[in-house]
Image (cartoon, grey):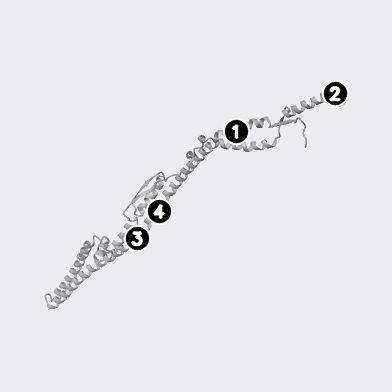
Amino acid sequence: MTTSQYDTRSTVINRPADFIESSGKAFADRLTPLLNPANKVITDNFKQNVQGQNKLQQEALQQAATQGGLGTLQFQGSGNTVSGISGTGVAGFQPFLDESQRLAGVDPITGEVTSAGMTAGMQPYMSPYQQQVIDATQASYQNQRAQGRQSIMDQAVAAGAFGGGREGVQRGVYDAQTTLGATQLEADLRAQNFAQAQAAQQAGIQNQQGLAQLQPQLAQQNISTLSSLGSGQQALGQAQLDATAANTREAAYEEQQRLGFFGSQFAPFTGGFGAQSQFTTNTTPPPSTLNTILGVGTMAGGLLGGIGSLMGGGS
């Protein structure tokens, strides 16, 4: 490949459309400050937070702890976690079970049924008017027997045998029967009172056992109600915390998102439009020293040859 003595160099500058160039510069000016570490987003402003337990939930936990015999709970921290438990260990239903065992005659120390325990368990159900009932009944009975004894005497007088041996035997038998009847009457009254007390005692034991079963159910219903109400309040509070964090995050990243949207919309234009203006510059470099010398020598040889011809020289 040969080149001419003087090469021509051309520089072509392609520039995008004016609106693309100005928009790109504005975009870069807004984007550059975001790269500065000093302008980083403070993420602590929208960090995740957990809504703590509210008073309703704490009360539900406290009632559950009391029901389980755990005593008073202590809460600490923003999440209101349980930090301390102190209690007797006596569950809410335990007093009813203890009372049913006492009524059944169980000794609380040995845990065994004793006669003293049974008497003590029976005593509350015995009629407090037992002796008065016995005395009144005995008085009525003795009055009736006295009338019968008087009838024997009257019959003996009428028969002319008053004070006789036969009358004495008859009165002795009658008095013995009266005494025996009075004793049997008192025994029957006491047995009747005992049977009634025993039936009432069994009913009392069943009632106490029923209360022992019912009490946890009622307590659990109350705990569940408080817990449900508290959970609703906690969910609402958590939603508010999440909404606040989301809003703060949106505000913090608003400019980045806006610039990102602009960049995604602007990107297709940077390649979709060709050069709108071209600038061409032709540059002819100056001759080098060697070319200058060679050019002068050639020119001098030509001049000498021409002069020789004019002078008529042959060579």
- Which badge, 2 or 3, is on the more N-terminal residue? 3
Asked if marks 2 and 3 touch (Cβ < 8 Å), the reply is no
Kind of residue at disc 3: Gln
User: What residue did someone put label 2 on?
Assistant: 308
Query: Going by the image, does 87 lie left or right of 3?
Result: left
At mark 4, the secondary structure is: helix
Q: Which quarter of the rendered picture does the N terminus lie within?
A: top right
Name the residue rendered at 44%, 49% in the picture: 228
User: What residue did someone put label 1 on?
Assistant: 28
In whole angstroms, how far apart are the C-alphas of marks 3 and 1?
82 Å
Residue 209 circle label: 3
Q: Can residue 212 be seen in this view?
A: yes
Residue 48 circle label: none
Residue 220 circle label: 4
In whole angstroms, how far apart are the C-alphas of marks 2 and 3?
152 Å
In whole angstroms, how far apart are the C-alphas of marks 4 and 1?
65 Å
